[in-house]
C-alpha cells in the first residue's frame, strides 16, 4: 500500500471530517430515512430514495477518508529546517516577469487549497521546487505557459 504524505494539520482535518460524518451526518440521514419510510409506499417515495443516496455517499466518503488515514504518513513540518525545499516547506517566490511575490506551502494532495496558499506535492510548481534552494530560479510549465520564479525564502512552520 502506498503511503500518503500529509501534514499534522491535514491529518487532524481528516479525523475531524470523519468525526463529523459519523456523529452528525449519519444520525441526520438515519432520521431522514425513518421519516421518509413513515410516509408509506417506498417505490415512489422521492424523499426516501434521496435519503438513501445521501447515506450511500456518506458511507463511501467515510470509507475513503478512513483508507487515507490508514495509509497516512504524517510529516511533522515543525521539526524540519534548512534552505532546501521539501514537503511541508512554506516557500516565498517572486515571478521573474512581473516581480509579484507569492507564498505557498507544499502539502499532501487532498490538503491542497490554492486560495489558502497550499499547493499539492504533485502540482507542477511543487515538483519544480522540490530540492531547490533559496536564490535558485525555477522554470514551471503551467497550462497558461512557462513561468519563471526565483526562490526568496524557505521556511518550516
Image (cartoon, rainbow, N blue to C red):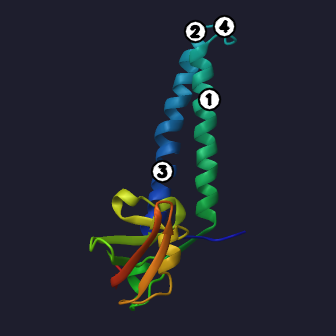
Q: Residues within 10 Å of mark 3 (few under 14, many from 20)?
A: some
Residue position marked by numbered label 1 in the rendering:
53
Mark 2 = which residue? 39
Q: Which residue is mark 3?
A: 17
Alpha-carbon distance for marks 1 and 2? 17 Å
Query: Dot 1: few (<14), some (14–19), or many (≥20) neighbours within 10 Å?
Result: few
Tell me, yes or no, if residue 38 can be seen here. yes
The numbered disc on residue 36 is none
> At numbered mark 4, what does the secondary structure look like: helix, strand or loop?
loop
Q: State how far apart marks 3 and 1 are (Cα).
A: 19 Å
Residues at circles 4 and 2 in contact by the CB criterion of under 8 Å: yes
Crowd class of label 4 (few under 14; some 14 to 19; many from 20; radius 10 Å): few
Question: Marks 2 and 3: which is nearer the front?
Answer: 3
110 in relation to 27, above or below: below
Q: Earlier in the sequence, mark 3 or mark 1?
A: 3
Cβ atoms under marks 4 and 3 closer than 8 Å: no
The N terminus sits in image quarter:
bottom right
Secondary structure, mark 3, is helix
- Judge from the rendering whether residue 148 lies leftward or rightward of residue 22; answer left or right: left
Tell which of 32 and 76 is nearer to you. Answer: 76
Q: Quadrant of residue 89?
A: bottom left
Sequence-earlier tag: 1 or 2: 2
Amino acid at each position: 500500500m502506498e503511503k500518503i504524505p500529509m501534514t499534522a494539520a491535514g491529518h487532524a482535518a481528516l479525523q475531524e471530517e470523519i468525526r463529523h460524518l459519523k456523529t452528525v451526518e449519519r444520525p441526520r440521514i438515519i432520521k431522514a430515512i425513518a421519516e421518509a419510510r413513515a410516509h408509506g409506499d417506498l417505490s415512489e417515495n422521492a424523499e426516501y430514495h434521496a435519503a438513501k443516496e445521501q447515506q450511500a455517499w456518506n458511507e463511501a466518503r467515510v470509507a475513503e477518508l478512513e483508507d487515507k488515514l490508514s495509509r497516512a504518513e504524517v510529516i511533522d513540518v515543525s521539526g524540519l529546517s534548512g534552505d532546501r525545499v521539501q514537503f511541508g516547506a512554506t516557500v516565498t517566490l517572486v515571478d521573474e516577469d512581473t516581480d509579484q511575490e507569492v507564498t505557498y506551502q507544499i502539502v499532501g494532495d487532498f490538503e491542497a487549497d490554492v486560495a489558502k496558499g497550499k499547493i499539492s506535492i504533485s502540482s507542477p510548481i511543487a515538483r519544480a521546487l522540490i530540492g531547490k534552494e533559496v536564490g535558485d530560479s525555477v522554470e514551471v510549465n503551467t497550462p497558461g505557459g512557462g513561468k519563471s520564479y526565483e526562490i526568496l525564502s524557505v521556511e518550516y512552520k
